[in-house]
Image (cartoon, rainbow, N blue to C red):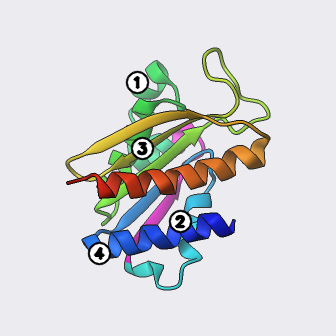
Amino acid sequence: MEHIVELAARVGLCLQERGLLLASTESCTGGGVAQAITEIAGSSAWFECGFVTYSNASKMKLLHVPESLLAQHGAVSKETAAAMCAGALANSRATVALSTTGIAGPGGAVPGKPVGTVCFGWATGTRTHVEQMQFRGDRHAVREQSVAHALTGLLEFLTTAG
């Protein structure tokens, strides 16, 4: 967890330097990103809110992820990760968003999406980046690796935003 809190602190500095406000939207990480961020004193200056949208119904209701997108691509998809970011930006004051959606296990695998499959999104109002990762380990390990990757990916997204 110490490594993750250090990452969150680096994210905070990066957001502050750019005058950005973050919203997280999480499924498989269950609020782990928001927890890491709020471990940092003063994070209210750069963290707007976190959405934990574990069910498809909550993704649709709170983030306006289209039901048709979920039906076509599934909750664990790059398309859903992008839509979750768009929904977080549209439903908050945030200027940048990150999303996590995946299969932490031990169950939940589907053909083509084994346990450990996690999709991520990072977005501003004008730019979105998504990726899919495959993590190994038990549920705790997959979730921890996902939180770390979400924060690392956000740093990369922000520093390459031009």
Q: Earlier in the sequence, mark 2 or mark 1?
A: 2
Q: Earlier in the sequence, mark 2 or mark 3?
A: 2
Q: Nearer the viewer, mark 2 or mark 3?
A: 2
Residue named by callout 2:
7
Question: What residue did someone put label 4 on?
Answer: 17
Badge 2: residue crowd in 10 Å (few <14, some 14–19, many ≥20): many
> In the image, what residue occupies the spot 67% across and 48% down?
143
Residue 86: image location, x then y, percent:
33, 46
**Residue type at numbered disc 4:** Glu
Position of residue 94 measured from the top left corner of the image (x, y, whole percent): 32, 64
Q: Earlier in the sequence, mark 2 or mark 4?
A: 2
Q: Nearer the viewer, mark 3 or mark 1?
A: 3
- Name the quarter where the N terminus is drawn: bottom right
Say whether residue 81 is left or right of residue 129. Answer: right
| Residue, disc 3 | 121
Amino acid type, label 2: Leu
Cα–Cα gap, marks 2 and 3: 17 Å
Quadrant of the rendered image containing residue 82:
top left
Which callout, 2 or 1, points to the residue nearer the camera?
Answer: 2
Q: Nearer the viewer, residue 60 or 33?
A: 33
Residue sitting at x 79%, y 41%: 138
SS label for mark 1: helix
Between the residue at mark 2 and the residue at mark 4, the CA separation in whole angstroms equals: 15 Å
The kind of secondary structure element at disc 4 is helix
Q: Can you identify the residue that label 1 sits on? A: 68
Q: Earlier in the sequence, mark 4 or mark 3?
A: 4
Q: Which residues are magenta?
A: 46-58
Element assignment for label 2: helix
Which of the two labelled residues, at mark 3 and mark 1, occupies the earlier sequence position? 1
